[in-house]
Amino acid sequence: MEIIKVAPRGYCKGVIRAVRMAIDCRKQYPDQKITILGMLVHNHYVMEALALNHIQMIDDPNKTRDQLLEEINEGVVIFTAHGIAPQVIEKARQKGLICVDASCPDVLKTQNLVKKKLSEGYEVLYIGKAKHPEAEAVCALSKHIHFMEPADPLPDSTNQRLFITNQTTMSVYDLKVLFERLKQRFPKAEFSEEICNATRIRQEAVAKLTDVDVLYVVGDRFSNNSNRLAQIGKERGIPHVYLIDTVQDIEDEQFKQAKRVAVTAGASTPTYLTDQVIAYLQHYDTNKQKPKIELSALLGGII
Ligand code: SF4
C-alpha cells in the first residue's frame, strides 16, 4: 500500500500564531485566570493541551461570543483566531478584563476590507458558514451586511452599490461557481475573493490527487477548512474519504483493499496527530496497537 503525504497539510501560520499567543499569555500573566472565548482554533485536542497549561475555554455553539462573554468576570480573555466583533472587545474592556486578540491577520484583512466598503456606502453580501465565529464577527459590523451560505438561494436584486466577499476558509471551487452566478445576478457588484492562502493551497493539493482509493483528512468536525478538504476529496471522485480526529478513529477495513491512501490535515490539526496517522498506515501490522494520544506532546513544533 502506498501512502501519499499530501503537501501542504496541517498547521497554518494563523493557528501557530494564536497558540503561541495563548502560551505567551500564560507566561506574561502567571497569576491571572485566563479564559479563551470559544475554541482558540478548531481542534479540541489543542484546547485540551492548552488546558494543561491552565488556559481554559468556554464555548457553546448555541451562544454568540457576546453571550459567552457574560460568563467571564476576571483575568484575561483571549479572542480566537477567527476574529471578534469590535463591540465584544469593547464590552470585555468595560468589564475590566485584560484583552488578548489572537485574530488571524488574514481574517483581519477581510474584516478591514468590509469596514472600508461600508464606510464608502456599499451594502455587503458576505458568504460564509452560519454560526461560524468568523462570520459572526464580520456580520456584527453593520446591519448593511447580508449573510448567505453557498447553498442558499441567491438574494433579491438590489439597486444599492454592492460589495460581495466571503469567509476565509470556504471551498475555492464552491465559491468560483457561486461568484459566477452572483455576477449574473448583480452585474455591477464589486467582488473580492478572500479565501486565505493556507486554505487555498491545501484545497488545491487535494484537488490534484489522482488514482487515490482512500483519503484521510485529519481534523476536528468543527473545523470548516477540514470539512472543506473532505468535501473536495469527495467531489473529485475519491471513493472513500474519512474525516478523522486521530489515529484512534481509523478502522482497518477502511484501507485494507486500497493500493493508494492519501493523508492530509486541516489548518488547525496538530502535526503530532497527523504524523501518528501516517506512521500507523506506513507500518501497518494487524497485531500492532494504535498509539495513544499524549497531550503533553501535542503542541510540539509550536512551543
Ligand atoms: S486558515 Fe487561514 S484565516 Fe484561518 S487561521 Fe489559518 S491562515 Fe488564518
Image: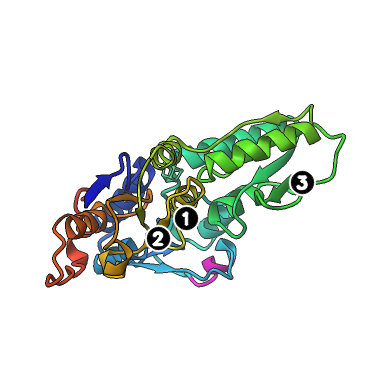
> Does the beta carbon of the residue at mark 2 sit less than 8 Å from ligand 1?
no
Tag 3 residue? 154
Quick one: label 3 or label 1, which is nearer the N terminus?
3
Amino acid at dot 1 = Asn
User: Which one is in front, 39 or 66?
Assistant: 39
Tag 2 residue? 243
Amino acid at dot 2 = Leu
Quadrant of residue 159 within the rendered picture: top right
Could you tell me how far apart the alpha carbons at marks 3 and 1 are, in whole angstroms? 23 Å
Quadrant of residue 165 within the rendered picture: top right
Q: Magenta: predominant secondary structure element? A: helix
Q: Secondary structure at mark 2?
A: strand
Q: Secondary structure at mark 1?
A: helix
User: Which one is in front, 278 or 189?
Assistant: 278
Q: Secondary structure at mark 3?
A: loop
Q: Which residues are magenta?
A: 67-71
Residue depicted at x 62% and y 31%: 192
Q: Is disc 2 surrounded by few (<14), some (14 to 19) or many (20+) residues within 10 Å?
A: many
Amino acid at dot 3 = Leu
Q: Say left or right for 222 vs 90.
A: left
Residue depicted at x 32% and y 47%: 10
Could you tell me how far apart the alpha carbons at marks 3 and 2 are, in whole angstroms? 30 Å
Residue depicted at x 59% and y 64%: 64
Image: 190 above or below 49 = above
Contact, mark 1 vs mark 2 (Cβ under 8 Å) = yes
Q: Is disc 1 surrounded by few (<14), some (14 to 19) or many (20+) residues within 10 Å?
A: many
Could you tell me how far apart the alpha carbons at marks 1 and 2 are, in whole angstroms? 7 Å
Number of callouts:
3
Contact, mark 3 vs mark 2 (Cβ under 8 Å) = no
